[in-house]
Every structure is written in C-alpha cells, then in structure tokens.
Image (cartoon, grey):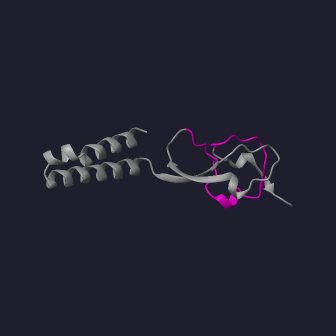
Amino acid sequence: MKRSVFLATLLLVTSSPLLAGCMSSEQIAATMQRVKDRKAEIDQKNPQILVIYTKKDISKGSIIKDDDVEERTVGATENHIPDDATHNRQNVVLKKAKNDMTAGQPICQHDLAPLVGN
C-alpha cells in the first residue's frame, strides 16, 4: 500500500500543470527516473506472483467453474497469502470445493478436492 501511495503522489506532483511549469524538463525526467528506480527496488525486494482468488462465494462440495475464479498479481511477501495458495487457474477449475470459500479469498490446495469424475 505504501508503494502505491508513494508512486501516486509522485506521479501527481510531476504531472501537475502548475508544478510542471516550475520544473524544467530535465528535473521532470530525473524525477521520473527516480520513481522508476524506486519501483524497481521495491519490486526486487517484493517480487510479484500470480495467485488465484474466488470471485464469488463457493459452497462446500460445489464444482469450481472458470467464471468463479480470477487471477491477481500480488507481492510474494505479503502476509495474507497462504503458503499453499494456487498459482495456476487450471489447477483449480473443475475441482470440488472441500471447504466453503468466500468472495475474494485466495484459493489454497487444502480447499480443493480431486478432479470431478475421479
């Protein structure tokens, strides 16, 4: 959250017409380069990974359809991502839900039953 606030603030400052008139093009370019460098530094410390989340509530025993899930890119070190979270949509679709899941929840391997028909 801090990273997005920092980047949004810096983008607002550098793109503001009033402030842009006070800054030379070299200063604007240098500021934008610092923003890119800072973003790269943050991304290196917290690499982004793909995690599968539920779009809506899924009941225990129901078959998970492709429309029920979504992919999100999140920071690998965020504490709300479980260790066994799924990272591949194909590993989730057409499996039964072993547990009730709420909308917006990351889908974990322990929440899934084997493939339907097996």
Q: Nearer the viewer, residue 38 or 45?
A: 38
Residue 13 found in image quarter: top left
Q: Position of residue 23 (x, y in %)?
A: 14, 48
User: Is 60 within the magenta?
Assistant: no
| Residue 22 position (above or below residue 26) | above
Image point (69%, 40%), residue name: 102
Image point (35%, 43%), residue name: 8
Q: Position of residue 96 (x, y in %)?
A: 79, 52
Residue 59 found in image quarter: top right
Point out the image quarter for the N terminus.
top left
Magenta segment, principal secondary structure?
loop
Residue 22 found in image quarter: top left
Residue 86 as seen in the image, left or right of residue 64: left
Residue 55 as seen in the image, left or right of residue 98: left
Tell me where the magenta segment starts and ends, as one range: 80-105
Q: Position of residue 117 (x, y in %)?
A: 86, 61
Image point (29%, 44%), residue name: 12
